[in-house]
Image (spheres, rainbow, N blue to C red):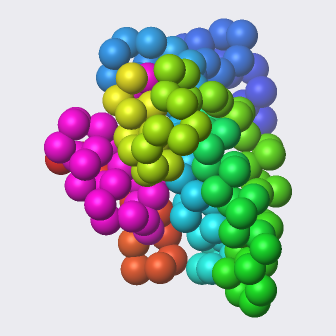
Amino acid sequence: MCRDWLTDCYQPTGGSTLALDRDGRTGRVKVLLDANALMMPAQFQIDLFDELRNILGGFEPIVLSSVMRELDGLTRAKGRHGAAARLGLALGERCTIAECGDTQPGSGTVDAQVIEYAVRNGCLVVTNDRHVRDELFARGIGVISMRKQKKLELLRR
């Protein structure tokens, strides 16, 4: 029996729309990627963007220019660490690169700039750095971190 003539009255016409976020806005979730997050695919063989898509749906990946400079410095290393940094740099170029705003490039660590940007813009942060994660939790920012070296997990405290 063919059911082509039936329409689902619960589906909106005109295609799919993005779900509302916690603040009632539609659109993509902003996700700030740390340097070690960009190195995760090479170190742990996971697909970073696919995992984020599974967790969040639509998202906008953002990388700070200071994180890109940090990865550029790490690419000079030999072995696995340098290869992971080179892959992270290539992945970072697929993202939106944001300047740190009023923070000068030499005024503070990259981790402090990541924390400050996330607080100012209210984005989720992907990181495995425990210090950064604890600081973000203290400020009420959600963190996406690796679980059991296989999957990413959204954490909020």
Determine whether, in the image, residue 78 is placed left or right of residue 145. right
Q: Residue at x 63, y 79 (%)?
A: 43
Where residue 60 appears, as percent x and y from the top left, is 62, 33
Viewer-proximal residue, 128 or 73?
73
Q: Front-most of 34 and 54?
A: 34
Q: Residue furthest front?
A: 106
Which quadrant of the rendered structure holds the N terminus?
top right
| Residue at image location 64% in from the left, 56% down from the top | 70
Q: Is residue 88 visible?
A: no
- Looking at the image, which residue sits at the far bottom? 79
Q: Residue at x 34, y 54 (%)?
A: 132
Q: Is residue 20 left or right of residue 15?
A: left
Vertical side of 129 occupied by 45: above or below = below
Camera sees residue 38: yes
> Relative to the observer, which residue lies in front, 156 or 109?
109
In the image, residue 156 above or below residue 78? above
9 or 1, which is in the foreground? 9
The range drawn in magenta is 121-146
In the rendered image, residue 20, in percent from the top left (x then y), is placed at: 44, 19
**Residue drawn at (71%, 33%), measured in percent from left and top?**
96
Residue 72 figure quarter: bottom right
| Rendered location of residue 7, percent (x, y) | 65, 18
